[in-house]
Amino acid sequence: MRVGKVLLLFSLMFIGAVYSAETISGPFHTVHGTSQAFDYVTVILMENNGLCDIITNTLGGCSSGGSAQYMTSLADNYSTATHYTGITHPSEPNYMALAGGDTYVSGDGNCCWQISKPNIIDRVEASGRTWKAFAEDATGSGTCSIMPPRLADHFPFIEFSDMNSASRCANLLTTTSPSDPEFLDVLNGANPPNLLWLTPNDHDNMHSSSV
């Protein structure tokens, strides 16, 4: 994951960080919103392209040089949040910060169940809400042997020690690229989880392929 401005699309695709009580040190200023909270959040994480690599128009000061028309339509029809950036390089510390509020690791390739810190799933469950996390083409779906193609680099849940339980691992699932039918069945089901996460593989997340 390159450090740089990233595009956040708020609709069914909602990419954002919900920090735990143990936050990254820094001069943070808390602003309490007045709008209604989201009941459902779907997180789909893409890689290695900035706002203007994506947007096909002049949104955010871009020069219409992007090539992702569908993502541009989401930005036009819904919302963007353009002041978020990657924290560091490479990928895994950024994903850890998104799920746990701190980087906790340096570099990629760390795995598994080694971080004894709070994470977003603790908060989701404590609030009485539900969740599921999918990784494209992972093995061991629904078990604590789940293994995404990039290990924990892009799937931070398998780094946290308190995720290593049968009840939680049952929600760590695989979905089949490129169309992700298992993920879509849950998303479009009668009772979707309050938090739904998708980690695409490196072909589908723009990491190792074009936009």
Image (cartoon, rainbow, N blue to C red):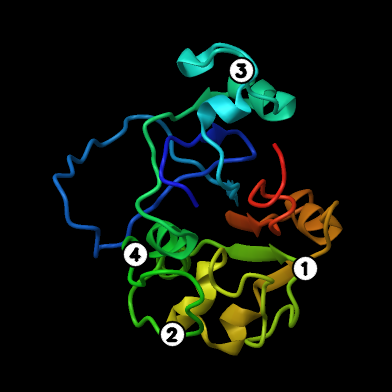
Q: Residues within 10 Å of mark 2 (few under 14, many from 20)?
A: some
Q: Residue at x 42, y 39 (%)?
A: 4
Element assignment for label 2: helix
- Please state which amino acid type lies under the numbered disc 2: Ser
Q: Which residue is mark 1?
A: 137
Q: Nearer the viewer, mark 3 or mark 4?
A: 4
- Please state which amino acid type lies under the numbered disc 3: Asp
Q: Residues within 10 Å of mark 4 (few under 14, many from 20)?
A: some
Q: Earlier in the sequence, mark 1 or mark 3?
A: 3
- Disc 1 and disc 2: Cα gap in Å? 23 Å
Q: Indicate the quadrant containing the C terminus: top left, top right, bottom left or bottom right.
A: top right
Q: Which residue is mark 2?
A: 161
Disc number for residue 103: 4
| Disc 3 and disc 4 in contact, CB within 8 angstroms | no
Q: Nearer the viewer, mark 1 or mark 2?
A: 1
> Could you say where residue 123 lies in the image, as x and y percent from the top left?
40, 64
- Please state which amino acid type lies under the numbered disc 1: Asp
> Could you say where residue 48 lies in the image, as x and y percent from the top left?
55, 45
Q: Residue at x 24, y 65 (%)?
A: 22
